[in-house]
Amino acid sequence: MTSSFDFAPLFPAGLPAPSARWTGLAKYSFVGGNNDSEQLPLDGLIEATNSALQKEGRSLATYGLAHGPQGYLPLREFLVTKLKRDAGINCTVDDLLIVSGSLQALDLVNATLLTRGDTVIFEQDSYQGSLTRLARLGVNVVGIPLDKDGMRMDVLASTLADLKGRGIRPKYIYTIPTVQNPTGSIMPESRRAELVRLAAEYGVPIFEDDCYADLVWSGQRPPAIHAMSPNGGVIHIGSFSKSIAPALRVGFIVAPWDVMSRMLALKTDAGSGALEQMVLAAYCKPHFSTHVPALTKALRTKLDTLMEALNEQFGTAAEFEEPKGGIFLWVKLPDQVDTLKLYQAALAAGVSINPGPEWSTNKPHSSSRLRLCFASPSHQQIREGVAVLAEVCRKEFGVPARSANVEKRA
């Protein structure tokens, strides 16, 4: 139905560009943070849903299940135990806020701390959702290069000193230290300690995004930066999107009360979805510690398939560091490849990719890079999709000259 009323003159200045209509996922979809549908613990979630509704279903008649604005108490209790066991974080249920996915966590932290013209420090390659939010807010983002161990502390130190010399105190240092998005690196404990030291020296809080931290191939992770900070200057966020299911939209924030109380005042949605919280609490307490290793094992095999397919189809034209966990591979193609243009051509051929510039504070640095999500497509779709992508890339940019060990004619 087409509206005859013209709303356009009523739109305020500064709105984001309009969204395109949804036309479905591409045949070969390597985008977004979607997970492996075969590994979704469906039977366990059905059982947990029935159990939660039978036990406490009538509490849905009360906002927040009468557990207060910080979220369902059994889920917060599970997180207290999990965070202590896995990340070394000592917190109580009062230090936790359940939110509608980590995206709401980003919005709440930003709304609490930022105003137009502020400065924040980021990893040079980082989460698109964080970067686009800051662009809309009119916040200055200073990118710090990464190496195989994450954010480089030497560059961070000189950047902090330079900003201080210009009278600028950054509002926070944002990092994804455990399975970095998009690079897949894990910051070692010694570097985390240096980050905590620098942040304290310059009086800048750390914003730790730990959304991928459950998906580490080795099953072993360093302590969270939050656990290593003696002065409480770390806001920590996490999510059940990658460990259980992204469509449930359940995340959490760990923060000191002086910040938490401000975020609560800004969280005006009358509480995040209660049924999702009830189901997760019922499922996770008995099953989380066995589900995640099985999920991680399956994801690791898909990564192997993706790397094999890239090596076969692109040869040396595709460069990448093997990630230490997660669901993404960050790929470098030859400099003449413009992945923003490759994205359009590939989509027309049924392959969706994330072009590098959308995931970086340094657009020229990332112009020939792309992010591939390997969790969602099947092994066969990964192989077929990479073959199609290689053919498109060869037609558009002459790369790779050889594909699947067959010389291609110009």
Image (cartoon, grey):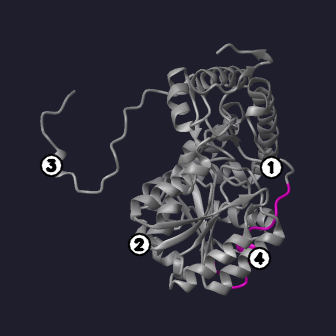
Confirm whether residue 80 shows in the render.
yes
The residues bearing labels 4 and 2 have C-alpha atoms spaced at a distance of 28 Å
Please state which of the two labelled residues, at mark 3 or mark 2, is closer to the viewer: 2
Question: According to the image, label 1 marks what residue?
Answer: 324
Q: Amino acid at mark 3?
A: Pro
Q: Which mark is residue 117?
A: 2
Q: Which mark is residue 9?
A: 3
Percent x, y for residue 153? 73, 71
Percent x, y for residue 127? 58, 53
Q: Secondary structure at mark 3?
A: helix
In the image, what residue occupies the spot 64% across and 45% down?
51
Q: The magenta stretch spans which residues?
A: 220-233
Q: Secondary structure at mark 1?
A: loop
| In-front residue for pair 248/384 | 384
Residue extending furthest front?
A: 410
Q: Quadrant of the N terminus?
A: top left
> Answer yes or no: do the residues labelled 1 and 3 have beta carbons within 8 Å?
no
Q: Amino acid at mark 2?
A: Gly
Q: Which mark is residue 194?
A: 4
When the figure is inspected, residue 352 is found, relative to residue 403, above or below; the finding is: below
| In-front residue for pair 360/128 | 360
Q: Which of the marked residues, 2 or 1, is nearer the chain's N terminus? A: 2
The residues bearing labels 2 and 1 have C-alpha atoms spaced at a distance of 36 Å
Q: Secondary structure at mark 4?
A: helix
